[in-house]
């Protein structure tokens, strides 16, 4: 259904394929990517592109945005069979996902953040379990967190389903901080993500995931609070160690 390669712009091709019911560009984010909600028959898709090659305003140029999209496909395919597929139009690759309903949990995106924090603690913990299980799979596949924050989460309140998205900047394997102040929100970032040359590895993933719980949980249960405190002070030696401690505390 989606192309190997076709010599038209994304909106032109997608309009032929089905109905474009949503568009996300510079009015909703500043990455330079342009994405679409597309319906074909009874099925909805989220289609992400690298945006206009002539757009030089974003931090990353077009080739950099293309590289991140290819990275996103590799990440998705490493943890689940076929959640993303690729095609190519004149503006570069199309990355195609199933459409997910929900509201952004970003602090600045409206009331969803506070409504989520006001949910029963067990419902919030169930969403965090989903997030942590996903990162256990990513960690096992060798991926290290990059630029994760509450804007990477959609929550569908009626169905209680969390969707995690925009993990394009995750990297395979440990590496060194080559930016100084890396991409991300200070509310979530580990200290090494602010220090040029510092090691970025599985411990970083553990820290950021723990900070996510701290941001989203008003009052963590005492056993979980102890896990989160360790993850963000003395630090766990790995994401797997953090995840085991979280699961053990959840079982109490």
Image (cartoon, grey):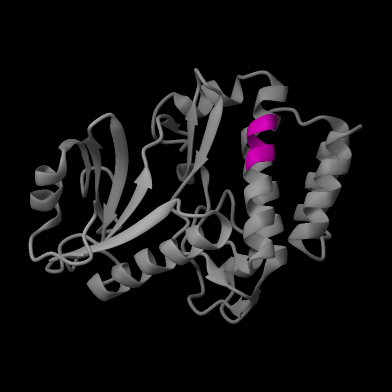
Residue 127: say if magenta.
Answer: yes
Give the residue at the far front of this rendering.
1
Q: Can you say whether 94 is above or below 15 in the image? A: below
Q: Can you say whether 36 is above or below 204 in the image? A: above
Q: Can you say whether 70 is above or below 251 in the image? A: below
> How many numbered marks, from 0 up?
0
Horizontal side of residue 122 vs 14, given as left or right: right
Horizontal side of residue 73 vs 236, given as left or right: left
Give the residue at the far right of this rendering.
252
Specify the quadrant that holds the C terminus. top right
Residue visible at 70% across and 66% down in the picture: 202
Residue visible at 60% across and 66% down in the picture: 143
Q: Is residue 208 visible?
A: no
Residue span colored magenta: 126-130
Tell me where residue 12 appears, x and y as whole percent: 8, 51
Residue visible at 66% across and 56% down in the picture: 137
Residue visible at 60% across and 26% down in the picture: 117
Tell me where residue 148 appears, x and y as whole percent: 53, 53
Determine which quarter of the picture holds residue 90.
Answer: bottom left
Tell me where residue 9 appears, x and y as whole percent: 10, 58
Q: Main secondary structure of the magenta part?
A: helix
Residue 41: say if magenta.
Answer: no
Q: Nearer the viewer, residue 150 or 42?
A: 42
Tell me where residue 88 appears, x and y as whole percent: 22, 65
Q: Is residue 228 visible?
A: yes
Horizontal side of residue 37 vs 75, given as left or right: left
């Amino acid at each position: 259904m989606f192309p190997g390669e076709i010599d038209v712009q994304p909106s032109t091709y997608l309009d032929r394929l089905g109905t474009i019911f949503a568009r996300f560009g510079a009015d909703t984010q500043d990455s330079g990517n342009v994405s679409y909600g597309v319906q074909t028959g009874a099925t909805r898709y989220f289609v992400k592109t690298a945006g206009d090659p002539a757009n030089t305003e974003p931090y990353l140029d077009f080739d950099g945005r293309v590289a991140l999209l290819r990275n996103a496909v590799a990440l998705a395919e490493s943890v689940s069979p076929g959640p993303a597929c690729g095609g190519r139009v004149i503006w570069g690759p199309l990355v195609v996902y199933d459409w997910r309903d929900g509201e952004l949990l970003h602090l600045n995106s409206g009331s969803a953040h506070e409504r989520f924090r006001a949910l029963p603690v067990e419902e919030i913990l169930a969403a965090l379990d989903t997030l942590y299980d996903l990162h256990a799979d990513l960690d096992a596949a060798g991926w290290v967190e990059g630029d994760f924050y509450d804007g990477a989460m959609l929550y569908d309140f009626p169905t209680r389903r969390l969707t995690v998205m925009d993990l394009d900047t995750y990297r395979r394997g440990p590496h060194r901080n080559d930016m100084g102040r890396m991409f991300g929100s200070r509310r979530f970032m580990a200290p090494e993500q602010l220090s040029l040359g510092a090691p970025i590895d599985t411990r970083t993933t553990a820290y950021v995931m723990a900070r996510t719980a701290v941001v989203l949980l008003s009052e963590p249960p005492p056993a979980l609070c102890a896990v989160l405190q360790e993850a963000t002070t003395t630090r766990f030696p790995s994401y797997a160690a953090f995840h085991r401690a979280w699961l053990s505390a959840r079982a109490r």
